[in-house]
Image: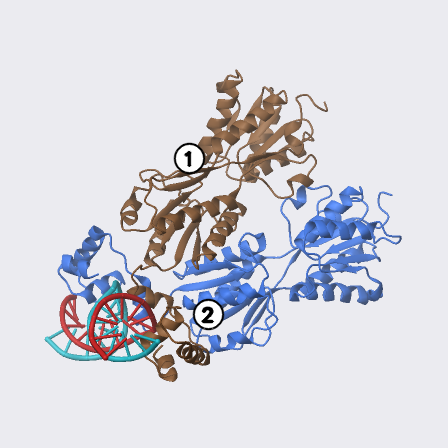
Chain colours: A brown, B blue, C cyan, D red
DNA sequence: CTGAAAGCGCTAACAG
DNA sequence: CTGTTAGCGCTTTCAG
């Protein structure tokens, strides 16, 4: 900046004014400074200015998700990015892999970089360690999971409601014996889905203690085995509700291996790509992760803009997409 | 930091030393400082230190990809992140949407944030505008596309070679009339794939000027229409090579609409999820975007570590995955 | 409309 | 082993 000022023959503050589009600079001076800056290929150092600036905003937000490579997280990421871009704010994204140890490390890293806000999916049981940081002015927005021990804006999918919708859809198609297959039962989302599913069955007069309920499925292969065992049992279910992506795929594989894909109904939570091209197409409850990301970023900026209202809980609706597998009736094709 | 020093009863520099794990501090002093820092919930400001630090490294790299929501880019992102994490470096990722105007804006934004390195997929024709920045010390690594007007490390898929592999695979299965369907012909990757495909056919004695070649397909629906037109023509191809993801999906749809999925062979470039669950399974050339991301980050850090060697061109091999659709013989099932 | 002086939080260099 | 001084690049404040 010194060089630019020297070349343009003006003071430091004038260069600063021009480059920040501040008023009270004559057109001629602006041009001289701009030319000098262009000639030297000079660029303001955002962080240096931040040290002294009154608002002390680094124009950066941190995003912590399961994995940036996972389609759900990737869509959240994009939603956050799109909102941030309108505010000249950059996004640091980090992958957590559901590992509580990483959580501490990554959060600490991000805070050291002085992010204005942190949008995060947590895996730790308790988030009270973040209270101090929140009090210091860092905006916190939780996404996909409910935080504990701290009050902050939170954006989640309608897990309970959507799982109930799935159950009712299967009930309406005549099923009474429906199995639940879920992932890690420690996760808040998994618990909500199971609760919602069981609640809807109970409402239809089904004894939920007798509902085949298999949890803690963490990968496709394991889920395929678990579903297979269920299908091969003496009293197999006529319909399946798979509460997570990979579990759904495992279930599809198990059904196909037995040639049962047109006999046993299936509804999956979370959409999977090409689901409409399978035979039968897979009926799902599609979440809206892009929207979740946008809303999270919007809440973050609202707080940065001074919103001091009560913490908000925003529930983003999922959508039932009928494609065939969820509309199979009991006893079909046999 | 002042407060911590005061509370611990030591000088500023001692606090700095402790928090940066520098040597020459007594164990007792370390403890006093750590306690004080913990009590005040104090964290070093990474960027403030950067202003004065000798290496002037912000421990941040920028990544510019098509879209963080796209599976290919998301895998690259994860590869970059995994390497960066081992170097205590954070990653800014930004989506370009193949828009040259965005390119300028995003690059400028990232440079203002003083990223140590920039890993980027470019859409502009020419990257010579980045030479000055490169000379100033910003490390540049290009990914997925070949840069023009600048010399820098570049990581790409073996587009030419892999497209040739696809062509030869179809030839070996008896096809002589094979169509090429590609995306935006302006893109370097698309051109390479077409060249590689045509070259392999020419080598087999096929007149490439007569090969049905349809380019500039930008979405699934358009590709489906284009493929449909081809299949409905008087002399339809017996096999298709689709050089991009969405085009592959469009082709699958067109084939199914006509009940031809078991008659006409298909090989797609880039893997698609659930491809093995379709009927028939889709044979693809799977790229390795995660590896591309890792290699790009490794090159970036090698340069930051002082590597002054010639710019490297790293070609990451793709892998042919046979799943059925690419092994259909001409005239099958009719 | 413009510039000079002070200082943001930190680390390099050096002195003790 | 520890502390002091200077100054990174910028913006604030205030005086012209």
Q: Which residue is mark 1?
A: A186
Instruction: Mark 1 vs mark 2: tell me if same chain.
Output: no
* Residue A212 percent coordinates (x, y): 53, 24
* Residue B32 percent coordinates (x, y): 16, 56
Q: Residue at x 42, y 72 (%)?
A: A43
On residue B302, which mark appears?
A: 2
Q: Quadrant of residue A266?
A: top right
Res B22 visible: no
* Residue B266 percent coordinates (x, y): 75, 51
Quick one: quadrant of the N terminus of chain B? Answer: bottom left
Is the Cβ of the residue at disc 1 closer than 8 Å to that at disc 2? no
Identify which residue, B156 or B30, lies in the foreground: B156
Q: Categorize mark 2 by other alpha carbons within 10 Å: few (<14), some (14-19), many (20+).
A: some
Q: Quadrant of residue A273?
A: top right
Identify which residue, B257 or B197, lies in the foreground: B257
A102 is higher (above) or lower (below) than A259: below
Q: Residue at x 54, y 18 (%)?
A: A204
User: Which element is circle 1 on?
Assistant: loop
- The answer to whether residue A267 is left or right of residue B294 is right
């Amino acid at each position: 900046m010194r060089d630019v000022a020297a070349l343009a023959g003006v003071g430091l503050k004038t260069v600063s004014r021009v480059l920040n589009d501040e008023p009270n600079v004559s057109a001629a001076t602006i041009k001289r400074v701009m030319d000098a800056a262009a000639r030297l290929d000079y660029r303001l150092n955002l962080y240096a200015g931040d040290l002294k600036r009154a608002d002390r905003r680094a124009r950066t937000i941190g995003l912590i998700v399961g994995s940036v490579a996972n389609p759900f997280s990737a869509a959240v990421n994009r939603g956050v990015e799109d909102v941030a871009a309108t505010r000249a704010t950059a996004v640091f994204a980090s992958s957590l892999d559901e590992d509580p140890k990483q959580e501490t490390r990554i959060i600490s890293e991000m805070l050291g970089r002085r992010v204005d806000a942190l949008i995060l999916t947590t895996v730790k049981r308790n988030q009270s360690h973040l209270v101090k940081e929140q009090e210091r002015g860092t905006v916190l927005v939780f996404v996909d999971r409910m935080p504990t021990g701290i009050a902050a804006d939170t954006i989640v999918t309608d897990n309970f409601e959507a799982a109930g919708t799935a159950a009712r859809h299967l009930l309406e198609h005549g099923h009474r014996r429906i199995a639940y297959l879920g992932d890690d039962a420690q996760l808040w989302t998994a618990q909500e889905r199971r609760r919602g599913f069981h609640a809807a069955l109970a409402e239809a007069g089904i004894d939920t203690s007798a509902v085949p309920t298999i949890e803690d499925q963490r990968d496709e292969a394991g889920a395929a085995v678990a579903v297979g065992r269920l299908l091969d049992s003496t009293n197999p279910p006529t319909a399946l509700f798979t509460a997570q992506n990979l579990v759904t795929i495992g279930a599809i594989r198990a059904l196909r291996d037995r040639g049962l894909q047109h006999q046993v109904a299936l509804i999956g939570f979370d959409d999977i790509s090409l689901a409409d091209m399978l035979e039968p197409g897979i009926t799902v409850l599609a979440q809206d992760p892009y929207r979740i990301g946008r809303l999270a970023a919007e809440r973050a900026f609202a707080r940065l803009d001074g919103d001091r209202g009560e913490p908000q809980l925003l529930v983003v609706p999922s959508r039932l997409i009928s494609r065939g597998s969820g509309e199979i009736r009991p006893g079909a094709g046999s």
